Image (cartoon, helix red, strand yellow):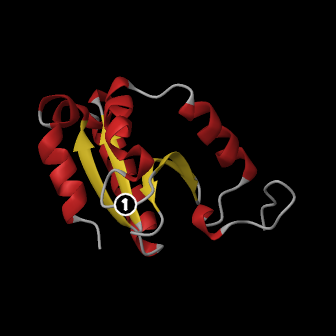
């Protein structure tokens, strides 16, 4: 069990190790422009009153956005995700997250910049 602030692991981390928690902290300080744009619309319970977390550690990964109540992971993919080997890693990562009972949806960065309303609509449609 990972201890966070002297307590046993919280279930929202799904067994994340301390190194993953540290990586998540670092990533929160270096969000991409697409992540920042989407975060403005997810924070403060703007989607149906659900709380989203940004750069959230789950298992061995740091996901871009996570809603524990809805068991929803949102990933934003830039150009690096066009590489075949990265696509394979993304698929394996999604399989692991799905095996934890989490729903994973992915958007291209361009979708966030060019069609934010549709992105938000798809997120809303994936909420319980």
Q: Which residue is drawn at 63% across and 70% down?
A: 11
Q: Where is residue 94 in the image (x, y as percent from the top left)?
A: 37, 60
Which of the two residues, 97 or 84, is positioned nearer the viewer here?
97
Q: Position of residue 95 (x, y in %)?
A: 38, 65
Q: Is residue 22 left or right of residue 62?
A: right
Q: Residue at x 35, y 52 (%)?
A: 74
State whether residue 28 appears in this view: yes
State whether residue 92 appears in this view: no
Above-or-below relation of 78 to 44: above
Above-or-below relation of 7 to 27: below
Q: Position of residue 27 (x, y in %)?
A: 55, 33
Which of the two residues, 85 or 125, is positioned nearer the viewer here?
125
Q: Residue furthest right?
A: 6
Tell me the quadrant of the picture where the N terminus can be found: bottom right
Label 1: few (<14), some or many (≥20) within 10 Å?
few
Question: Regarding mark 1 in the picture, which secondary structure is present there?
Answer: loop
Q: Which residue is drawn at 27% across and 50% down?
A: 106
Q: Name the residue under label 1.
A: 49
């Amino acid at each position: 069990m990972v201890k966070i602030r002297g307590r046993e692991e919280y279930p929202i981390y799904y067994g994340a190790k301390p190194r993953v928690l540290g990586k998540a902290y670092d990533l929160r300080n270096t969000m991409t422009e697409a992540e920042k744009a989407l975060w403005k619309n997810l924070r403060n319970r703007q989607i149906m009153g659900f709380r989203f977390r940004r750069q959230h550690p789950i298992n061995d990964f740091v996901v871009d956005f996570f809603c524990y109540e809805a068991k929803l992971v949102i990933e934003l993919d830039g150009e690096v995700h066009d590489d075949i080997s990265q696509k394979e890693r993304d698929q394996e990562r999604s399989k692991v997250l799905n095996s934890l009972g989490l729903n994973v949806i992915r958007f291209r960065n361009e979708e966030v910049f060019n069609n934010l309303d549709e992105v938000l609509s798809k997120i809303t449609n994936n909420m319980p």
